[in-house]
Amino acid sequence: ETGVTQTPRHLVMGMTNKKSLKCEQHLGHNAMYWYKQSAKKPLELMFVYSLEERVENNSVPSRFSPECPNSSHLFLHLHTLQPEDSALYLCASSQGRAGFQETQYFGPGTRLLVL
Amino acid sequence: DQQVKQNSPSLSVQEGRISILNCDYTNSMFDYFLWYKKYPAEGPTFLISISSIKDKNEDGRFTVFLNKSAKHLSLHIVPSQPGDSAVYFCAASTSGTYKYIFGTGTRLKVLA
């Protein structure tokens, strides 16, 4: 496997469910990101981890809970979501040079539908 | 307040001609700019970037121009090919932060 992978690619969940999105990067990077892309809106940064430490939390509701056990893996734990949380969730990684002109590389995304 | 704007939601160009995609920004602290391409059901793919110390960067058929005084950047694709049909996003960041601000994207259609 190369690049950034995400599983599952599609997810349908009820508002009372608990699920997790997984991201893995094979690029040797030190920083990982979660983004949300809703229809007709720009990509919105949710969380950033650098060397397993959270360095950005963009006022995301607590029903989204990130976890970064090591620099290659990133999870997004979901619980009691709302229908408006339906979106494409993208993971990205970058070298982690303290945010200096970094290029982020994206995974294919997880298309989430909350019923 | 949207700091990065792509005012054209779509663009159609004949194969072999030049495609010009535009992006405007408002934050003068941005010093690194990127273009990404996105196909349906895939994540954005990095295309080309430019630092604010430059006004042009070229990579094959793709050239990015930066006009700092106008807070404007553009992506030129020459010659355009049908495989270039995708949504193109510009993004901007400030050194010392991990935050990218993305535009809403422009859908390019290259007609054969």
Image (cartoon, coloured by chain):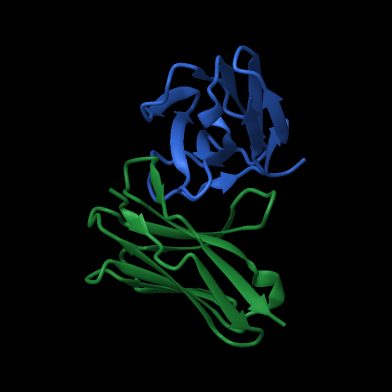
Chain colours: A blue, B green
Query: Which quadrant holds the N terminus of chain A?
Result: top right
| Total numbered labels | 0
Quadrant of res A18: top right
Q: Nearer the viewer, residue A7 or B33?
A: A7
Residue A4 position by quadrant: top right
Q: Compare residues A35 and A106 and report the one nearer the observer.
A: A35
Where's residue A3, x and y in %? Answer: 68, 44
Q: Residue furthest bottom?
A: B17
Task: Residue A39 in the image: state x and y as whole percent.
Answer: 53, 46
Q: Measuring from the top left, give residue A90's x and y in whole percent.
A: 58, 39
In the displayed structure, would residue A5 be above or below residue B72?
A: above
Report the residue at 48% width, 64% height from top. Answer: B9
Q: Residue at x 55, y 27 (%)?
A: A83
Residue under the point 53% across and 29% down: A85
Q: Nearer the viewer, residue B49 or A113?
A: A113
Question: Most extreme residue toward the right, as rendered?
Answer: A1
Compared to residue B54, the image places residue B100 above or below, namely above
**Residue at image point 57% right, 47% down:** A105
In this rendering, position of residue B98 left or right of residue A28: left
In the rendered image, the vertical position of residue A51 relative to residue A110, given as above or below: above
**Looking at the image, which is closer to me, A105 or A72?**
A105
Residue A15 on image: x %, y %:
60, 17
Q: Quadrant of the C terminus of chain A?
A: top right
**B50 shown above or below B59:** above
